[in-house]
């Protein structure tokens, strides 16, 4: 498609339609859902870019199900995504980071279930640092004529029909996969369209860079501490020491890792022995993207995408990135046991 891109810029909508046409019998429902998410992303992007002058910065005053302070822009993003999904008529259940309960739609016979984190990294909002939206799409397990239940939503990550994220930074980018590679789109604000940037993102096999919050180091597993000590030692032959890059937004940190390579780590600690990142709407969608780009996404024991979830807000450790970086980490984790 490289020559085609040189001759004709593709919009997100054109790309989705062309991808859909590759499959006999495709109904277009998933394509419609991706377009609806793209529309919501444009609206959220507009507000993120002018949040400081529209009084959307700062805290709303409430806390979400995880006890975290809810930002005003969090609420706006949550509402826009829910509205877009409800309009589609093909979603039966929504699960948001901001809501404790399943959100059932009137279209309870909808084919799809969507998990989403409306504004990942929202602690960065007030200081004008990039944030993002994460989404994960599943097909419901039960028959469409019955009401969808929580059991329909509790599926391992390797059952995802699609997953993606939107990065609101110096430009707004939408990155997604339907299991056939990873594609990225950049929002052109002059025409209000997401334009194809790359239709086959591949993460480098290795890069001497890591991303982790070292403030929690005293509570990490021994294997993680040993690994971090190892990559800080000077050894030009193995390109050590590695460079530390940490933003504090999973979307931002993993977007950089996806494009440049390296490793993103969010290990368990004393306060969060099962990890802090949410399996269903953070680890699974981002892990799916990393794997589709040729990288690894593990929880320290195995593939994140093979974890059978027990609850919609379940957490998990996360180690994602370039294959050789993650494999080296696993050597240290295995030696710990």
Image (cartoon, rainbow, N blue to C red):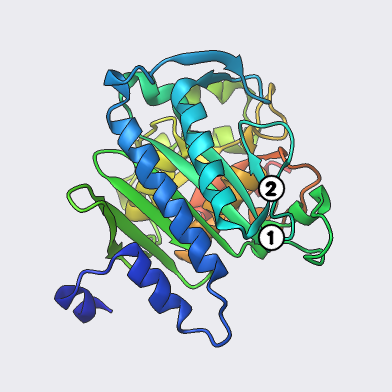
For image coordinates 21% across by 69% down, the residue present is: 9
Neighbourhood count class around disc 1 (C-alpha, 10 Å): few under 14, some 14–19, many 20 upward: many
Neighbourhood count class around disc 2 (C-alpha, 10 Å): few under 14, some 14–19, many 20 upward: some
- Quadrant in which the C terminus appears: top right
Q: Position of residue 323 (x, y in %)?
A: 48, 59
Contact flag, marks 1 and 2 (Cβ < 8 Å): yes
Provide the residue designation for mark 1: 110
The residues bearing labels 1 and 2 have C-alpha atoms spaced at a distance of 8 Å
Labels in figure, total: 2
Q: Quadrant of residue 65?
A: top right
Q: Position of residue 324 (x, y in %)?
A: 47, 58
Q: Is residue 88 visible?
A: yes
For image coordinates 78% across by 42% down, the residue present is: 311
For image coordinates 35% across by 59% down, the residue present is: 184
Q: Is residue 227 visible?
A: no
On screen, residue 272 versus residue 293, left or right, reads: right
Q: Position of residue 111 (x, y in %)?
A: 68, 64
Q: Secondary structure at mark 2?
A: loop
For image coordinates 65% across by 19% down, the residue present is: 67
Provide the residue designation for mark 2: 105
Q: Secondary structure at mark 1?
A: loop
């Amino acid at each position: 498609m490289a020559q085609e891109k040189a001759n004709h810029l593709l919009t997100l909508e054109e790309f989705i339609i062309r991808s859909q046409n590759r499959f006999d019998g495709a109904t277009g429902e998933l394509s419609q859902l991706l377009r609806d998410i793209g529309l919501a992303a444009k609206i959220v992007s507009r507000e993120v870019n002018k949040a400081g002058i529209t009084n959307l910065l700062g805290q709303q005053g409430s806390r979400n199900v995880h006890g975290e302070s809810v930002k005003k822009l969090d609420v706006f993003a949550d509402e826009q995504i829910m509205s877009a999904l409800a309009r589609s008529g093909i979603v039966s259940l929504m699960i948001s980071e901001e809501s404790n309960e399943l959100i059932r739609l009137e279209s309870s016979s909808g084919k799809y279930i969507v998990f989403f984190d409306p504004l990942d990294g929202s602690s960065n909002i007030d200081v004008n640092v990039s944030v993002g939206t994460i989404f994960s799409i599943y097909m419901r397990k039960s028959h469409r004529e019955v009401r969808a239940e929580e059991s329909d939503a509790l599926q391992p990550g390797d059952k995802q029909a699609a997953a993606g994220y939107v990065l609101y930074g110096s430009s707004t980018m939408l990155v997604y996969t339907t299991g056939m590679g990873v594609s990225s789109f950049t929002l052109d604000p002059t025409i209000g369209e997401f334009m194809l940037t790359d239709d086959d993102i591949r993460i480098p096999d290795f890069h001497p860079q890591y991303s982790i919050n070292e403030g929690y180091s005293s509570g990490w597993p021994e294997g993680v501490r040993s690994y971090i000590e190892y990559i800080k030692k000077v050894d030009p032959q193995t390109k050590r020491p590695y460079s530390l890059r940490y933003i504090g937004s999973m979307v931002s940190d993993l977007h950089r890792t996806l494009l440049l390579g390296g490793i993103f780590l969010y290990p368990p600690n004393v306060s969060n022995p099962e990890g802090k990142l949410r399996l269903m709407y953070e680890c699974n969608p981002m892990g799916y993207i990393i794997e589709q780009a040729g990288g690894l996404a593990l929880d320290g024991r195995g593939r994140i995408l093979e974890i059978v979830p027990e609850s919609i807000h379940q957490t998990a450790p996360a180690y994602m990135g370039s294959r050789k970086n993650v494999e080296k980490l696993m050597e240290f984790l295995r030696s710990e046991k």
